[in-house]
Image (tube, rainbow, N blue to C red):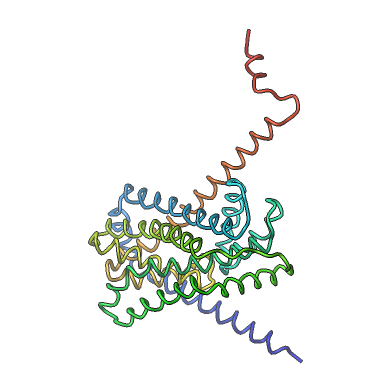
Amino acid sequence: MANPSNGRRRLLKLLRTAGYSIIVVFLCWQIWRVRHGLGDSLSSVGWSAIGLAAGFTVVGTFPGFLGWRLLVTGTGMRLTLSDAAWVFFLSGVTRYLPGAIWPPIVQAALAKRVGAPAAGLMTAGLITLVLTALSGGIVGLLAVPYLAATEPMWWLALPLVLSATGAVMLAPRLFKRLLSLGQRILGRGGHEIVLPTGRTSMGVLAYNVLGWSCNGTHAAILAVALGAPPASAMTLGIGGFVLSAVVGALSQAPAGLGVREVVLGLTFGVLVSGPDLITLLLLSRLLTTLGHVIATLGVLGLLAGTRFVAARRDQPGHHPSDHSRRSRP
């Protein structure tokens, strides 16, 4: 007899795949529809705007790391800066896999190498996901006044985000449940982990708000280059991008692919349209991916180079003055 739960899982997987396929086909059709105007739209952006936008996507990666490290420290674990950067940025590569749960899982898998409890890093990663989504909702409120001008239902986002933020700050039981979830996933328990204080959680939120704002600024820069009013672009643009990124992450699609573009198109459609809108969507996806890759490779490359130099220095018989002595006549 077939297991009903297996049948439901297959049905959900089929529906999810069909939904992603519809979104991708829709986006491809939109690109094809405005294909004749894309060249002019791309040239109107200019390399200076593209470079500035790319810079903000690179910078926007680091506040998230600082917030995660603050949370790790606040839950009773001590990692060196290099170990923390190695765990965070290496686990961040998994953002391109389906589902947002992979970074905490990879962080737990790397815990032994840095002398940290696996359940502790898993829990810190899970709490980070919650606080990252909340901070994204807070920044996304920038777009609400503009969106509510055409659809008043958007005002409901204000009490929802504020109540969710207050609930997380005032309800440590949620974090305890995340701890239990992390221990169950790992099949390990019994390790007592200090929950983050409200001050620590507020600090993590502040770092993530800064990171979201930097990432959203890249979209505002592109919108201004495409003719959008600067004041609207810096509010609706930043808030709209962050809303699309949060929805994309919650959709479980790899890096929110497709889902983020649909939401971003709905919000930015107030500022730009036609080929300009499609150009913005394409450049936003390209630059955010490029910024994350540059930051990740830069940090991991720097760590690898530093450890290589340190290993060479610690080799028996190696002295820094050897080379200078050999170079003398």
Q: Position of residue 178 (x, y in %)?
A: 61, 71
Q: Position of residue 259 (x, y in %)?
A: 46, 72
Quarter of the rendering occupied by the N terminus: bottom right
Quarter of the rendering occupied by the C terminus: top right
- To which quarter of the image does residue 182 belong? bottom right
Task: Tell me which residue sits at (39%, 56%) in the image.
Answer: 214
Which of these two is toward me, 92 or 32?
A: 92
Q: Position of residue 257 (x, y in %)?
A: 49, 67
Q: Residue furthest bottom?
A: 1
Tally the marks. 0
Q: Position of residue 275 (x, y in %)?
A: 31, 65
Which of these two is toward me, 110 or 272?
A: 110
Q: Is residue 159 above or below residue 103?
A: below
288 with respect to 89 (left or right) = left
Task: Tell me which residue sits at (46%, 69%) in the image.
Answer: 134
Task: Tell me which residue sits at (51%, 52%) in the image.
Answer: 293
83 with respect to 112 (left or right) = left
Q: Is residue 173 above or below residue 72?
A: below
Which of these two is toward me, 222 or 318?
A: 318
165 with respect to 100 (left or right) = left
- To which quarter of the image does residue 206 belong? bottom left
Task: Tell me which residue sits at (57%, 46%) in the image.
Answer: 81
